Image (tube, rainbow, N blue to C red):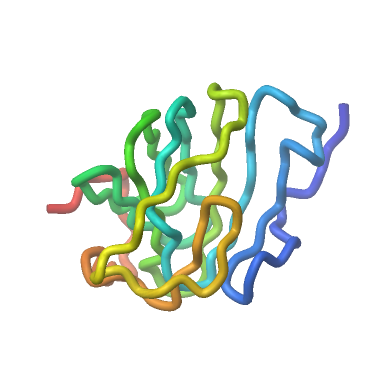
Amino acid sequence: MRVVSAVPTESISEKLSVQRLSEALGVRNLRANVFTLAEGSMSRHMHREQEEVYLVLDGTAMIDVDDQQYKVGEREALAVPARAWHRVANVGVGPLTFFVAAAGGGGRRPTTTPRSKADPPASRPFGHFSIHSRITASSGHASAARSTAAHRVS
């Protein structure tokens, strides 16, 4: 057993960095990562067998899950079920840092959707994530006020 840093230091692109906690800790049955997203959003994707928990550490996220949007603030979490299409966007002021844990499915790679005309072009893929250069029109812009609970946005 050991203690490792959870600060994202591996640069994936100029907008995204990660700390792969599972690898650093030698964990085989759980995928756990900490990401920092400077701006923009990740591509819409889904995991056939894996559930995921997103925990926002710093900043504000808009997490699209199927047809619903959830604003998730600091120290708030959202569970995404297996087979749900989802995307994370940074809608706050400053960087978004979040923890993602997933179990089940044997670490299979997720499925990504073909981009619609409403989605901005991806700048660089990262596994199942593609970093977009701007926030999509559907996610809007969140106020700087901190919410008290993850909630669905109409």
Question: Is 11 situated left or right of 49 in this image?
Answer: right
How many circles with numbers are drawn on the protein? 0
At horizontal 19% and vertical 46% (from top left) the residue drawn is 67
At horizontal 53% and vertical 72% (from top left) the residue drawn is 38
x and y, in percent, of residue 14 in the image? 62, 76
Q: In which quarter of the image is residue 135?
A: bottom left
At horizontal 63% and vertical 38% (from top left) the residue drawn is 32
At horizontal 47% and vertical 46% (from top left) the residue drawn is 75
Vertical placement of residue 72 versus 120, above or below: above
x and y, in percent, of residue 56 in the image? 48, 50
Question: Is 46 situated left or right of 38 in this image?
Answer: left
| Front residue (pair 154, 144) | 154
x and y, in percent, of residue 45 in the image? 41, 47
x and y, in percent, of residue 100 in the image? 55, 42
| Front residue (pair 138, 45) | 45
Q: Quadrant of residue 21?
A: top right
Instruction: Please state, as top left, top right, bottom left or bottom right, where the N terminus lies in the image.
Output: top right
Outermost residue toward the left in this view = 154
Question: Is 71 situated left or right of 60 in this image?
Answer: left
